[in-house]
Amino acid sequence: MSFVKFAAFVFLCCVFESALSQYIHDCKSAGLCCESVNNTCFVPNARKMNGEVGVCFCDSKCLQMQDCCSDFQETCKARDCIMAEWGEWSQCSNSCGRGRKHRKREIVQERAFGGKRCPTARKSKQACYGEYGCLQQSVEYSREEMAEVGYIMPANYSIWRVSKDYSPQHDIRKNLFFKNFQDNVIPRKPVYRAIFKVTHVGRACQRTQWARVLEKGAEVCVECQPTSMNKRLERCTGHGVFHQETTWKAIEVRNCHGKWKMITHHEYETCNHQGDHDFVLV
């Protein structure tokens, strides 16, 4: 290239750069917005936020360095992290008994230009009680339950929840309570109940007012509370088997016993604690 051509090329470049500099004078016109410290993310001969003219930057650290271009905060707005809603809980890790379930949430928008960071809690776990794989309540595997006796008392005795007079540590359940829970560990499984139909009843049940309702054909609600649950089984002893006949006995009523058939599945509900056809297992 001859000297004349080279000189012309340099002249044109200077003219182009001068003309270009008239249009590129801030982050927006330069099309720059950069994360973290970026020494290449700058605009020459532009106005800074403090009013000075010179090299200014369009990276997310320029605010800290105090060398941002005048339009940085408007053009490169801080963008906070946005998280999605929590997903559905997973199935309980234990198919029959205590376990854990999990859920998680995804990042919808990453943080940018000094915005709020994403929370570290992107996963959550919770205790659960799996029952979908249990063999209980299946007639084929319920020999233990079929042989058990359900010891019952009126549900209105369960007002120990709000009265110290009926605390399970002091009333007629105290022997059972201290036998099962010497270490004060009570199963976390919630209260559950089922409806039973009385199929047989002994004459001795007529001796006590509350046991007289246990007549043949009567339908009664029977509740299992955590303080009465067998710690090993994490359920009440004698809680019945669906559509099968099992044995019951009335607490503190001598020779008052009989049989009943469980006519509804167990459900996490309570019986009527003021009803005369409502009982709790002990």
Image (cartoon, helix red, strand yellow):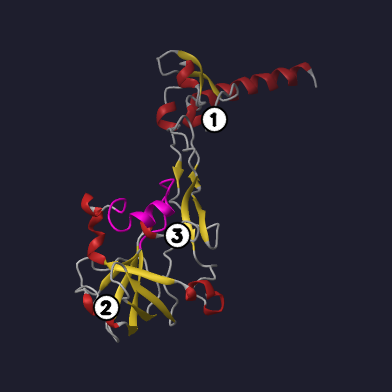
Q: Which residue is mark 1?
A: 35
Kind of residue at disc 1: Glu
Kind of residue at disc 2: Cys
What secondary structure is found at the residue carrying circle 3? Answer: loop
> x%, y% of residue 229?
41, 60
Kind of residue at disc 3: Asn
Task: Name the image quarter holding the C terminus.
Answer: bottom left
Q: Observer-nearest residue: 78 or 211?
A: 211
Q: Observer-nearest residue: 79 or 123?
A: 123
Magenta region, residue range: 168-191
Whole-number angstrom distance, CA of label 3 to CA of label 1 = 60 Å
What secondary structure is found at the residue carrying circle 1? Answer: loop
Task: Classify residue 156 by image quadrant.
Answer: bottom left
Task: Classify residue 225 by image quadrant.
Answer: bottom left
- Sequence order check: which comes first, mark 1 or mark 2? 1
Whole-number angstrom distance, CA of label 1 to CA of label 2 = 82 Å
Q: Which residue is mark 3?
A: 230
Examine the residues drawn in magenta and state their main secondary structure. Answer: loop
